[in-house]
Amino acid sequence: MSVDFANPQRTAFDLTGKVVVIVGGGQMPGDKIGNGRATALVAARHGAEVIAVDLNMAAAQETVDMVLAEGGTAYAVHADVAEREDCEHIFDVVMQRSGRVDGMVYSVAINPPFDRERNEMSLENFNKGIDVNMLGCFYCNSFAAQCMEKNEGSSTGSIVNFSSIASLKNEVGLNIGIMPYALGKCGLNYITELTAAQYAEVGVRANTLMLGPIDSTLGNHDSQDLFGMAADEVDAAYNEVLRLKMGRASSWETAYAALYLLADESRFMTGQQIRFDGGATLVR
Ligand SMILES: NC(=O)c1ccc[n+]([C@@H]2O[C@H](COP(=O)([O-])OP(=O)(O)OC[C@H]3O[C@@H](n4cnc5c(N)ncnc54)[C@H](O)[C@@H]3O)[C@@H](O)[C@H]2O)c1
């Protein structure tokens, strides 16, 4: 696709003609919208054909139905990102059905169950966390980039991996519960850099949005588990533990940051780990 930024008639952040795969495009059932679903809706509103991929097919289909209800184009694909074959299958289906991949957002993460009193987690659960949070990201980056490099033009594809400030800052201490998540996100940051370095020459980009505490259903649910809190204690605990400067964002803010990274407007940006946390990690 050619990009003419000098054209005064140009529509900014236009994703028309682009095929965007949102891995984790369903969401945990609940009333607060998740980052994947919000990004799917915003990408579709800006013209993209959206593919919502999730382990929870009903949740992915719900996202698709929301996009279709707004007049957008979308379909759902089932995958367990812990399985390499499933990750490969996502992109086989999309290439067959849509013929190209222009954007891929990795918006999956889990916090496996653990024994908070004893500070223990089974090896099986620990490994599952790493498989979903990190290995799945590796596979999806690989398969997505291999599709994107087939595109022609000056901007061939954009990968956005949703990381977390948990990869930078651990205020939970030596709590085994956070480990598969935090280590997975450290790995994800690294995978982003590797993808960016390897594919820059062919115009495929990869960036990380390091999210701070986002007010999604999953964010609240998992924080309760990690800290052992009641639902109405989460906001206060975040403020105390993380010393938030701007409180918490909704997933819509994440979606608009992702939109910039998916759009051609960001085509010179690659390999970046962007802190998207309302200043939570600023030391001053
Ligand atoms: N909410 C926060 O505070 C926060 C903070 C930092 C980063 N993030 C990141 O944002 C992303 C989305 O999280 P969210 O809080 O918006 O929740 P969400 O409700 O979007 O949950 C993630 C989705 O991943 C899916 N999923 C889980 N395991 C899967 C698997 N094995 N295969 C395929 N799909 C699977 C779930 O079904 C769910 O739809 C995650 O990467 C998370 O780490 C969230």
Image: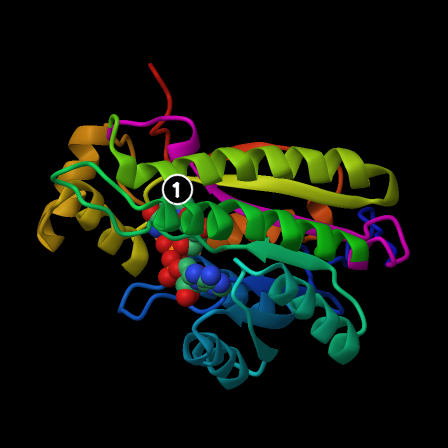
Q: Is residue 213 left or right of residue 17?
A: left
26, 56: nearer the viewer: 56
Q: Is residue 25 above or below residue 7?
A: below
Is label 1 within 8 A of ligand 1 (CB to nearest ligand atom)?
A: yes
Hey, what amino acid is under mark 1?
Tyr
Residue 26 lies, in percent from the top left, at: 45, 69
Q: Residue at x 37, y 35 (%)?
A: 278
Give the magenta-colored segment's residue range: 147-172
Residue 225: horizontal and vertical position, in percent? 19, 49
Q: Is residue 270 visible?
A: no
Location of mark 1 (residue): 181
Residue 103, given in percent of the width and then of the height, sits at 68, 58
Q: Within the magenta stretch, is there residue 113?
A: no
* Quadrant the N terminus occupies: bottom right
Residue appearing at x 35%, y 64% in the figure:
33
Q: Secondary structure at mark 1?
A: helix
